[in-house]
Image (tube, coloured by chain):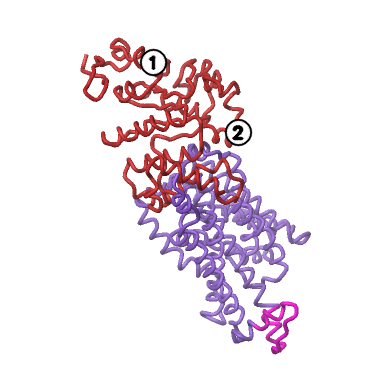
Chain colours: A purple, B red
Amino acid sequence: MNLAAVKQIGPGQRRARSLAVIALLLVLLAASVVLATGMGAVAVPPWQTLLILLNRIPGLHFDVPGQYEIIIWAVRLPRVVCALLVGFALGISGAAMQGFFRNPMASPDIVGVSAGASMGSVLAITLGWTLFSPWLLPASAFLGALLATFVTYALATQRGRTETATLLLAGIAVSSFFSSAISLIYHFIDDGVLRQIVYWLMGNLSGKRWEHVTVLFPVVMAGSVGLWAFSRDLNVMLLSEDEASSLGVNVERTKRWLILFVSLVTGAAVSISGMIGFVGLIVPHILRQLVGPDHRWLLPASGLGGALLLVLADLAARTLFAPIELRPGIVTALIGVPFFLYLLAKRRELVRWN
Amino acid sequence: MELTPFHLRGVSYRVGGRRILDKISAAIPARRLTGLLGPNGAGKTTLLRLLAGLRRPAEGRIELEGRDLTEWSSADRARRIAVVPQSPAVGFGFTVEEVVAMGRHPFLKRLQPLTARCRRVVAEAMEATRTLELRERLITELSGGEQQRVFLARALAQEPDIMLLDEPTANLDVRFQLEVFSLIKGLQRERGLTVVVALHDLTWALRYCDHILVLNAGRLEAAGTPGQVLTPALVEKVFGVRAQTVEGSFGALVDVGPL
């Protein structure tokens, strides 16, 4: 055996490039957070924003105007952090779902998982569970997401293969079912709750506070770490279920874990922000071009890409037509729909992806 | 090591009431190249899937070293048995090296990077199949013959003692067929592997196999050495052609003609 050959085997160029992409995303994300917290009705210069953020590090102290500190710390930052976490959740679950369904058109909103999570959330709001504990909303969203993923998977997958057409149809069916169920609930509630629900459903990040972050952060991180732990199994499952099984993957058990983690992450995101579409579709697609199909890199990169996209989309939504505030979901849809149509047009090529 | 790693005892398999395999009892000899012959739809692929532990028999049992194969965990199986499917999935833009390294999956814990030993095994597998120079190419860019060698390399990276191959030369031109078969035979001899290969070409079966199982409509029609099994009567019965074994200048071959 020649030793030179052994030395060649290993991480290689892909890892170097993936690390570079992830580092770049981290830098861009940090910059966009500073930018987004600074911009708004009261503009805070970016360097002031940076100092305010750095002030929180023990041992550092910078003099900054007090009213800036309140705006940044109490009002804007929790919202931006929520956007970041929701975007991260949507990006990483989109990447995991595309691998899991072995289909590039899969994403939480298209597969109906977001609708399931919405249904769970609406139920929780309607029944007044949110008054008891801030955790009941995401818990209920998680159960809705779990149900939706499971139903779509059962409908769309035969012998471990998911045809794009079947997946889209099953997604439409599942989404419509949950939307109808939500509409049904409208008839039985009073106007105050109805307004609360409709406002929430439209996909919204305004008025997010630190307590939302407290709920979102641990759930999204736990689910993401869970997904990441399965990244090598996801790689092997991209080939085919039989091949994965002959390479030692317990396919059925792995699928159950993946459904669980995706539902957890998506459920948490939807329970905080309502439905925000297309992040989970676009981001993994673009990042797959940059880092390749290896989920060990693709999952974290998609999370960071989703976070970056949603922080910027929310910033655009808040500032483009100020004082009118758009929903961030509109911005992501305006970018996402053309992208989706482009993917559909390319579908013949994408089918070969399987 | 036992002389017969696999024992099939009255194995049947059905799909939606249709019998694909019917009460097959056979032993696969250890450290030999066993050929699985039979017309299209005879159940060769299904039998390989059962041997790989990817499907459960409807009746009967398959024993690997005396233990029911369905009791083996998928990771334990994967450390012993490597499978080269007929048309492996090739999409998704993995590089050749990434595909071969997947053979190490059953040996690694979650998120554990390739060990030094893994890298050595992967490099050896690629060297043995002459895929080392294709290392950084995307698997989708390769020709059929090159892809076949890559999947052979992935199987070798599992360090199996049993290899199952489903028509490894389907869709390959004659040069690649010869290349793939002599590669498989060479590896089998060198490493003392137990190999089961489904194939169509009677001449390759005659030249390369030590042992042959013939399936016909889900039943085991014959088992034995190529000389015992590939008789004109059997070939006529199973394949519906006339056949005779003749000595060609490059070795024995099965000459066939219409009935």
Identify the chain of the residue marked 2, using the numbered disc in the image.
B
The segment highlighted magenta reads A51-73
Identify the residue position indicated by label 2 in the image: B73
Kindly identify the amino acid type of the residue bearing the numbered disc 2.
Answer: Ser
The answer to whether residue A168 is visible is no
Residue A10, percent from left and from top: 49, 53
For residue B190, which numbered disc appears in the image? none
Residue B180, percent from left and from top: 34, 34
- The mark that comes first in sequence, 2 or 1, is 2
Mark 1 neighbour density, 10 Å: few (under 14) some (14–19) many (20 or more): some
Q: Nearer the viewer, mark 2 or mark 1?
A: 1
Identify the residue position indicated by label 1 in the image: B225
The answer to whether residue A188 is visible is yes
Residue A299, percent from left and from top: 55, 57
For the N terminus of chain A, the quadrant is top left
| Residue that lies at the very extreme toward the front in this rendered image | A2
Q: Residue shown at 54%/35% (left/top)?
A: B78
Identify the chain of the residue marked 1, using the numbered disc in the image.
B
Between B153 and A191, the residue placed more toward the observer is B153
Total numbered badges shown on the rendered structure: 2
Residue B41 within the magenta-colored segment of the rendering: no
Kindly identify the amino acid type of the residue bearing the numbered disc 1.
Answer: Thr
Between A279 and B36, the residue placed more toward the observer is B36
